[in-house]
Amino acid sequence: MRPLFPPELMRDFDARATSEYGIPGLLLMENAAQRLLELIAAELGPVDQLSVGIFCGPGNNGGDGLALARLLYLRGADVEVWLLAPADVLRGDARTNFEICTKLEVPLYQPVTLDEIAFEEYDVVVDALFGTGAVRAPVGLYADVITTLNDLDIPVLAVDVPSGIDAGTGVATTPAVQATWTVTFETGKPGLYLPPGRQHAGDVRVSPISLPISIDAMVASQWFLPDDSDVVALFPPRARDSHKGNYGRLLIIAGSRGMSGAARLAASAALRTGVGLLMVAVPESVRPEVASQSELMTVGLPGDDTGRLDRCRMADARAVLEMGRLHCLGSGLGPG
């Protein structure tokens, strides 16, 4: 079970990393850039053969993008940085990485219009615009860039969270980046797993950057993402000498003419849970349709002229209720 943390807690962890543990923010940013570089190399091959466009905003998310640009540039990639914010608004670690890129003469541009950007030349584009701190819909050139990226068939790598997605809730602004991959740092964020954020995030990779998070904080988290092993643990092991009677008897009363599929779907779901003995009771007129799902045991109930259960004759079907210790009633029975 993996804990997920909303953006406000992640910002608190970032601040405490420096104030309590003495870990420089610049080191965390460097680690983040390294994780991004690793994904690009793993997914797209040698970086010195790639053309990469990195779109940076005014905050630390943009700083991650600038740090990545330096790493790519020093490894021979054809990299271009598009800084959509005025350079004089950059602060702290983002400013430091901007100045390093400038001294190294990393190609860095501040576009005024969309026409200045040749999107189609890139093998991959990096979204380092807003990150987890953004709460407003992108406007102006930011919105134009995001809309264009979504319209093109170019892989997009989102830094921490796709721009336009609320990292805490998954709510999407218009527009919001549609990423191919999202590398999110240290822990997952709820918004990457809740719709519609989940659909925008693409393939989510959780990557460590040496951010200290206490065991107490992990246990106290209100959001968790189950692993396969967590789901398997819900199903207890079965004894070798057991039989179907040891694993529950379920009676499903469902279906009507035109809605026999509801009964079949309910039965399929029940079988997947591992129920031992399953009986499906449906109006007699639709029983052949339900019975066509060969592993099901079925029983016909009195029906009316419309193919629904005949309420006036339900007393005749009381014995059917004894077939199950658990009962499921309702799927596809029809209105009323």
Image (spheres, rainbow, N blue to C red):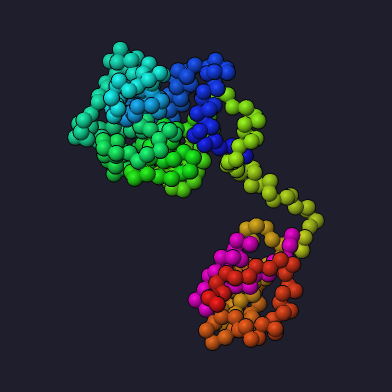
Task: Check the image and report above or below for 62 versus 22.
Answer: below
On the image, which quarter does residue 201 sit in? top left
Badge count = 0
Q: Position of residue 212 (x, y in %)?
A: 58, 24
| Residue 313 visible at all | yes
Q: Position of residue 66 (x, y in %)?
A: 36, 22
Q: Position of residue 226 (x, y in %)?
A: 60, 43
- In front: 93, or 19? 19
Q: Is residue 180 left or right of residue 327?
A: left
Asked if the magenta segment contains residue 253, the reply would be yes
Q: Quadrant of the N terminus?
A: top right
Q: Quadrant of the C terminus?
A: bottom right
Residue range (magenta)? 247-270
Q: At x 70% / y 83%, what residue is drawn?
A: 315
Q: Position of residue 77 (x, y in %)?
A: 32, 23
Asked if the magenta segment contains residue 56, the reply would be no
On the image, which quarter does residue 249 sit in? bottom right
Q: At x 79% / y 57%, what residue is drawn?
A: 242
Task: Check the image and report above or below for 215 versus 194.
Answer: above
